[in-house]
Structure formats: C-alpha cells, structure tokens
Image: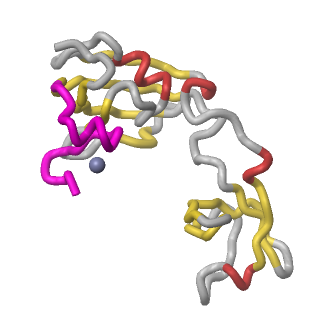
Amino acid sequence: MEIRRNKVVALDYTLKDDAGNVVDKSGKTPLYYLHGYSNIIVGLEEALEGRSAGDTFEISLPPEKGYGTRDPKLISSLPISRLPEGTKPMKGQKYNVQVGNQMRQVTITKVRVTDVEIDANHALVDKTLHFAVKVRQVREATKVELEHRHAHSPGHDH
Ligand code: ZN
C-alpha cells in the first residue's frame, strides 16, 4: 500500500543536524501520523508521498521545509517573578511558560536585572534537517482518525 492522503503511516526516523549530531529520533515504538494533514513537517510529508512499508531513505530539508526561520515576534521579555519559583535564570535555560493563553517552551536568551529576554521559536528554526527514515507500516485511517485529523497509535486512542 502506497502512502497517500488518508493513510496512517508508522515510521522510524533519526534526525541529525549539519554537524551530524542526533537531535531527535523515534523510540521503541514508531511515530504514527495521518498523511496529508500537516501533522509532521511539510518536507518530510512530501518525501513520504508514494512510499511503501519497508522503504528506507535519507533526505536533507532546508529550514523552509522544516521548522522555518526565526520569527522576531516570538522574542519577548518576561519578568523574573513569572519564572518558576526559586530558579536562578541563566542564558540558555529552557522553561515552559504561559504565553498568551498557551504553554510554550521558551529559551532564555538574555538575563537582565528584573526581567529576561525569552525566545519562543522552535529549537530547530534556521536549521537544515537531515532525516534517515524507515517506513514500518501503511494502513487505511479509521473513521475516527479522519474525524480527529490525526493518527491513533496502538494503545493511545484516548
Ligand atoms: Zn484523536
């Protein structure tokens, strides 16, 4: 069965940066996603189109096909009092903080006297992504998966 819109795909992947460091990989269970709904990054979804179970491939994606380029609007400041209690802010630390009405992971990029500069861009913006992928399984999506617009991996179907 070929990967097309409305198929659920299970895959193993390893993601490396330009220096060859592994920055992300699937675990013991593969990653399940619903094809055609932008549930995974656009360049990877395009590269998977038409593949079948058992296929392996490598692909390098520029930032525009990956996590995008840095958005200056996602850089802001936060009073130190709003960081988790008892923490001493340092450059490079990551926190989950409330931004607007959602929780986001942010990285501290500057520490000042009463506030810190935080960057809510994804850690992999501006990066070329090097994926090694193995397609484990391709199946039809269930009616519920199509309604939810995402895959339900085994044992995780809420
Ligand atoms: Zn669901």
Q: Which residue appears farthest toward the bottom when viewing the image?
A: 86
Q: Residue at x 78, y 64 (%)?
A: 117
Residue 81, given in percent of the width and then of the height, sits at: 72, 85
Q: Position of residue 129 (x, y in %)?
A: 51, 29
Q: Is residue 2 left or right of residue 80?
A: left
- The mark total stands at 0
Does the stretch in magenta take in 142?
yes
**Residue name at image x 60 percent, y 88 percent:** 85
- Quarter of the figure that contains the N terminus: top left
Image position, residue 96 (x, y; %): 56, 68
Residue at horizontal 57%, vertical 60%?
Answer: 105
Q: Left or right of 76: which side holds 148?
A: left
Residue at image coords 81%, 75%: 115
Q: Is the image coloured rainbow, by chain, by secondary structure, or in one colour? A: secondary structure
Relative to 4, does residue 79 appear above or below in the rendering?
below
Position above or below: 95 against 11:
below
Q: Position of residue 43 (x, y in %)?
A: 49, 22
Name the image quarter holding residue 139: top left
Q: Main secondary structure of the magenta part?
A: loop
- Quarter holding the C terminus is bottom left
Q: Residue furthest right?
A: 113
Query: What segment is highlighted magenta in the picture?
Result: 139-158
Q: Is residue 123 above or below residue 33?
A: below
Q: Is residue 37 magenta?
A: no
Side of 68 where 40 appears, left or right: left
62 or 51, which lies in front?
51
